[in-house]
Amino acid sequence: MDIYGEYREALEQVMEHLAEAIRRVSEEAEKRTGSGLYEHLIYRIKGDESMREKCRKKGLPETAQSALVAVRDAIGLRVVCRFVDDVYAVAEALKALPGVNVAEEKDYIRDVKPNGYRSYHLILSVEAPFADVRGENPGHFYAEVQLRTIAMDSWAALEHEMMYKHDAPNRKLLTAELKRCADELASCDVSMQTIRNMIRGEGGI
Amino acid sequence: MRVLLAEDEKAMSAALVAVLKHEGYEVDAVYDGKAAVEQASKNAYDAMVFDIMMPIMDGITALKEIRAAGSRTPVILLTAKAEVEDRIDGLDAGADDYLAKPFAMGELLARLRSLIRRNQTDSASLTLGSVTLDVEHQELSAKSSIRLASKETQLLQLLMANAGKPVTTETIAERVWHGEEADDSVVWLYISYLREKLAAVGGNLAIAGSEGGSFQLAVAS
């Protein structure tokens, strides 16, 4: 049986609600400025088997309670933006949604991880008109949202692909080189943002 | 520290090698200009000391060839002749300093230290406030790090070397873009890049100024 049991439908509704909110915010920006806030938006409910594996790794029983409360990324969304400012614009819009509270916020764009990883992570607690695993209605459901630029996203994808092989030779050198690539891409992101600010007449800063 | 010495008088060469080694330098000694050019193309030196009057190829010709090959290693010329022409030719050929024979060994050593020190600080890292600029690697860092483009590095280096002083757009165009086309808007764009990048690494430096005017780097209060 599916680890989410009777709550799967609610998870899908909550995920769709968040995705719809992001689309709406982007469309409003497009009307105002001529360009939307993101390049692409993907989302998923964590698969049954991978959620069970995560519970096992954390030493949790494979129950809906574990999957929906102890683990907080059953619902996952990734917003890939063109510009750094757009990342923050989407994040602010999500935080301002009614019924949404921020459970955790990690700004790895400002507080860059030592390996060069940059991304903005939000764990949201979303109130929705469905019973949750605690028996409350309206219930509360966690969702993880990762926001980053195209450059940050491509770095994360390539880094994962290359460093997944744990026994790669020259690991130390490769890690340092990948960090350098991340810092170069970040530099381009900032330059592109500066150029757009100039075009939009917002000056240097 | 490795020094290339080109001096054809054997006794003089032996004395210089002994003194330099005593001071902790590794020394490669050659006895004509052609051998100096060959050695310089093979190894990385921290400084070179060339006599001017040498067989096969003189010191000034050797220096010109080494500079033409792109080397920026500091070079001190030794000249037996106290003629002004020789000194002018030598400096124009790319020498950084000269000493007229006879010279005091202590002075040669002091000039070597001075040149090597200057060459190192030119390419070392600069720190101001919470911000460090690693010039060689073009890396800007504070809370996090970011890589800069070549012109951004040169511009920030100029502003950091003149922190607290206004630097005009004209000075920047001349010092960073040299003879290239650079109008006010290019300088302004690069100032804007640096402002955003200083913010991106969480640094506490601010660049004051507006398009076409003077710019002043300072620790933000």
Image: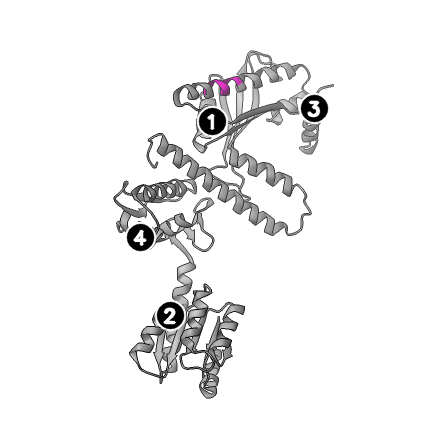
Q: Which mark is residue B1?
A: none
Does dot 4 land on a helix, a strand or a loop? helix
| Dot 1: chain letter | A
In this view, the mark in front (2 or 3): 2
- Dot 1 and dot 3 residues touching (CB under 8 Å): no
Q: Are marks 2 and 4 on the same chain?
A: yes
User: Mark 4 Cα within 10 Å, few/some/many (few <14, many 20+)?
Assistant: some
Q: Are marks 4 and 1 on the same chain?
A: no
| Dot 3: chain letter | A
Can you see residue A103? yes
Measure the C-alpha gap from mark 2 to mark 3: 75 Å
Mark nearer the N terminus (1 vs 3): 3
Pointer 4 residue: B174
Pointer 2 residue: B93
Q: Magenta stretch mostly in which secondary structure? A: helix
Residue drawn 45% across the image and 29% down it: A86
User: Mark 2 Cα within 10 Å, few/some/many (few <14, many 20+)?
Assistant: some
Q: How many marks?
A: 4
User: Mark 1 Cα within 10 Å, few/some/many (few <14, many 20+)?
Assistant: many
Pointer 3 residue: A48
- On the picture, is A63 further left or further right than A187? right
Q: Which residues are magenta?
A: A20-25
| Dot 2: chain letter | B
Residue B210: x and y in percent read: 27, 40
